[in-house]
Image (tube, rainbow, N blue to C red):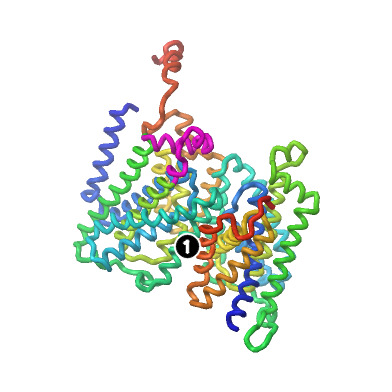
């Protein structure tokens, strides 16, 4: 029964990984750029939330009302002010976002020290639904999972049903033709980066409530999101959700076997998928 | 600069550096070891990203593997220290082959994160292996019976050999057929493939060579430091330093990493008392250069003044320029 519990916890965690992954693959899909600062930007969101909790006395989840729009703006400005100028080569945006990752990590470390911090959401974090003697589903992990799925659904609807979504997909499919029909690709890129960072802000705050965080944790988040993308298969939001769940379960099961093996098991499952099914477990040809 | 002057200057510089144990203190020698290993790492990363188009952010894997292989061979296997350094480099190169088989399935940005995952896997494996000291790390004891001065001198000469070797390797490689292939890949990968360059083979070759160089650098670094901690040996900061050095100095040029290393090292020595702020400043400069001056400091100088320290380019335009000079140039 412990195992059932472990798998359930893994599935719930996987939703969050999918949320990290969705922002990453949205930006990649639209402008073919991998934002290597993605994880560190989620840590930035967590620290913003921490500031609001400590200085304005807000409840952690309530801070999303401010943190999400702020991170959207950060994304828009980052893209419009820097990355849009780096798109001439494949190399430059990678170098710029990697530099940003290192800069952010070190600035956060100077500002907040290297200590682990946490966001305290009170009883929400500790209460759970008991099913029988051995299975307990925490309310907060469940809320996290449901939120992740809802955000993914919202992204899906945005991409498929709205004017902006059509512009995003058009730019993704064929940038030149999109330009021809009057889509300003730089503005689209900036909006895409804004949306990406809004989703990563949600993921960052939820993960900060769930576990502790420190300035150095960003790269791990980037890697988990990336692994979810590749395990799921490029280009499909629901594949990404499945990839996140596979990764979450792998980590939970690995950690159950030996506390030091959780993250490593996730990496090994990712490498196995890469070796055996390089297109992912749930591939789709179109890009999201 | 004519080749004779170039060779003379190079020879003089090498002689001064080789005689460093006569003019430098042990502390200065240790700093020079650090400088030379940084130069090596930068040259390796420049070959990867500047020529083969491979943005690896996982080169710390091979530094860590080199360090731990050096420890395992010497402390556990009783191998002679200086032979152990060479074998550690080979171990890193050997491990890079199966890694390449995996990460080469990914492209560009995803390749970058893939190499990072591979580095994390090795990091976590070491953390979970008690035989290699686990999270606490290990001390390198097997070199302690060598007299301290002798050890410092030999370590320094090995680092010097490595640094010069890395520059020479890049130089010879770039002047060879392989270099022509790599330059073609750098300029246009699809075009290179089209005219018959075996792109994959060239890339794997560079990846393995870079792992070898990073492995040697890792072993020599810890022969100098004598204590390996897994979090330090496998930190992504290694790769961050390589990238900052190469991007600031000039990506895809041989001189760039040399200039970048000197700048980086000078700033590090000058500002390390301000904590991590020098890293932040370097990062900001590297971002600005990557976006707005992608050819880097050396690339900019070379473009503006038409100079190069290493004869790597083929000067096709020699004939027409001579004609112009004969007509117009008052200096002629």
Task: Report x, y in % for residue A163.
Answer: 80, 49
The residue closer to the viewer here, B91 or A195, is: B91
Look at the image and tell me in which quarter the N terminus of chain B lies: top left
Q: Is residue A117 left or right of residue A172?
A: left
Q: Is residue A2 left or right of residue A261?
A: right
Task: Report x, y in % for residue A175.
Answer: 69, 41
- Residue at image coords 23%, 54%: B154
Q: Is residue A104 visible?
A: yes
Q: Which residue is mark 1?
A: B120
Q: Is residue A75 visible?
A: no
- Residue at image coords 65%, 76%: A120
Position of residue B34 relative to residue A129, above or below, is: above
Q: Which residues are magenta?
A: B176-203
- Residue at image coords 24%, 41%: B15
Q: Is residue A155 left or right of residue B42?
A: right
Q: Chain of mark 1?
A: B
Q: Residue furthest front?
A: A276
Badge 1 marks a residue whose secondary structure is helix
Q: Is residue B17 left or right of residue B307?
A: left
On whether residue B196 falls in the magenta region, the answer is yes
Look at the image and tell me in which quarter the C terminus of chain B lies: top left
Position of residue B311 relative to residue A191, above or below, is: above
On whether residue B238 falls in the magenta region, the answer is no
Crowd band around label 1 with a 10 angstrom C-alpha radius: few (<14), some (14–19), many (20+): many
Main secondary structure along the magenta-highlighted residues: helix
Task: Report x, y in % for residue B126.
Answer: 41, 67
The residue closer to the viewer here, B88 or B196, is: B196
Task: Report x, y in % for residue B309.
Answer: 37, 34
Residue B330, by quadrant, is: top left
């Amino acid at each position: 029964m412990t195992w059932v519990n472990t798998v359930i916890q893994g599935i719930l965690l996987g939703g969050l990984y999918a949320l990290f992954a969705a922002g990453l693959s949205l930006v990649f899909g639209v402008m073919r750029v991998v934002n290597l600062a993605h994880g560190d930007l989620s840590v930035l969101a967590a620290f913003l939330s921490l500031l609001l909790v400590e200085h304005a006395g807000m409840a952690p989840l309530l801070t999303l009302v401010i943190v999400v729009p702020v991170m959207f703006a950060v994304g828009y400005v980052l893209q419009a002010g820097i990355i849009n100028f780096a798109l001439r080569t494949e190399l430059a945006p990678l170098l710029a976002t990697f530099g940003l990752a290192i800069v952010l990590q070190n600035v956060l470390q100077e500002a907040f020290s290297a200590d682990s911090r946490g966001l305290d959401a009170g009883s929400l974090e500790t209460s759970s639904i008991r099913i029988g003697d051995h299975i307990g589903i925490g309310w907060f992990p469940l809320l996290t999972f449901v939120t992740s799925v809802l955000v993914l659904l919202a992204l899906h609807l945005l991409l498929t049903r709205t004017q902006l979504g059509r512009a995003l997909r058009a730019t993704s499919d064929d940038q030149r033709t999109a330009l021809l029909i009057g889509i300003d690709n730089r503005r689209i890129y900036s909006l895409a980066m804004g949306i990406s960072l809004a989703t990563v802000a949600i993921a960052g705050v939820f993960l900060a409530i769930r576990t502790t965080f420190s300035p150095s944790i960003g790269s791990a988040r980037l890697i988990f999101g990336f692994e979810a993308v590749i395990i799921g298969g490029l280009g499909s939001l629901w594949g990404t959700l499945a990839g996140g769940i596979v990764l979450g379960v792998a980590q939970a099961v690995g950690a159950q076997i030996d506390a030091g093996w959780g993250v490593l098991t996730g990496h090994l499952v990712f490498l196995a998928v890469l070796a055996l099914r390089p297109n992912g477990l749930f591939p789709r040809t179109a890009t999201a | 600069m004519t080749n004779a002057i170039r060779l003379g200057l190079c020879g003089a510089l090498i002689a001064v550096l080789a005689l460093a144990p006569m003019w430098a203190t042990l502390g200065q020698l240790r700093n020079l070891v650090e400088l030379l290993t940084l130069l090596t790492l930068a040259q390796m990363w420049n070959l990867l990203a500047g020529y083969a188009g491979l943005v690896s952010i996982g080169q710390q894997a091979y530094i860590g593997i080199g360090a731990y292989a050096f420890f395992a061979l010497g402390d556990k296997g009783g191998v002679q220290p200086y032979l152990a350094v060479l074998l550690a480099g080979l171990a890193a190169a050997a491990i890079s082959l199966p890694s390449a088989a995996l990460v080469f399935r990914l492209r560009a940005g995803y390749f970058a994160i893939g190499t990072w995952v591979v580095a994390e896997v090795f990091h976590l494996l070491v953390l979970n292996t008690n035989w290699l000291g686990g999270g606490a790390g290990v001390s390198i004891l097997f070199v302690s019976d060598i007299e301290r001065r002798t050890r410092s001198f030999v370590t320094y000469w090995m680092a010097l050999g490595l640094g010069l070797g890395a520059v020479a390797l890049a130089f010879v490689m770039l002047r060879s057929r392989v270099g022509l292939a790599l330059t073609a890949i750098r300029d246009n990968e699809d075009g290179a493939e089209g005219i018959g360059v075996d792109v994959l083979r060239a890339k794997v070759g560079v990846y393995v060579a870079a792992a070898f160089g990073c492995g040697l650098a890792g072993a020599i670094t810890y022969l100098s430091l004598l204590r390996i901690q897994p979090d330090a040996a496998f930190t992504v900061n290694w790769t961050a330093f390589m990238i900052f050095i190469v991007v600031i100095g000039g990506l895809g040029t041989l001189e760039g990493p040399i200039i970048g290393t000197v700048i980086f090292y000078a700033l590090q020595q000058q500002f390390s008392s301000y904590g991590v702020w020098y890293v932040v400043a370097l990062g900001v400069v590297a971002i600005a250069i990557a976006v707005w001056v992608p050819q880097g400091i050396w690339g900019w100088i070379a473009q503006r003044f038409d100079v190069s320290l290493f004869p790597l380019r083929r000067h096709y335009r020699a004939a027409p320029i001579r004609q112009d000079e004969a007509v117009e140039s008052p200096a002629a």
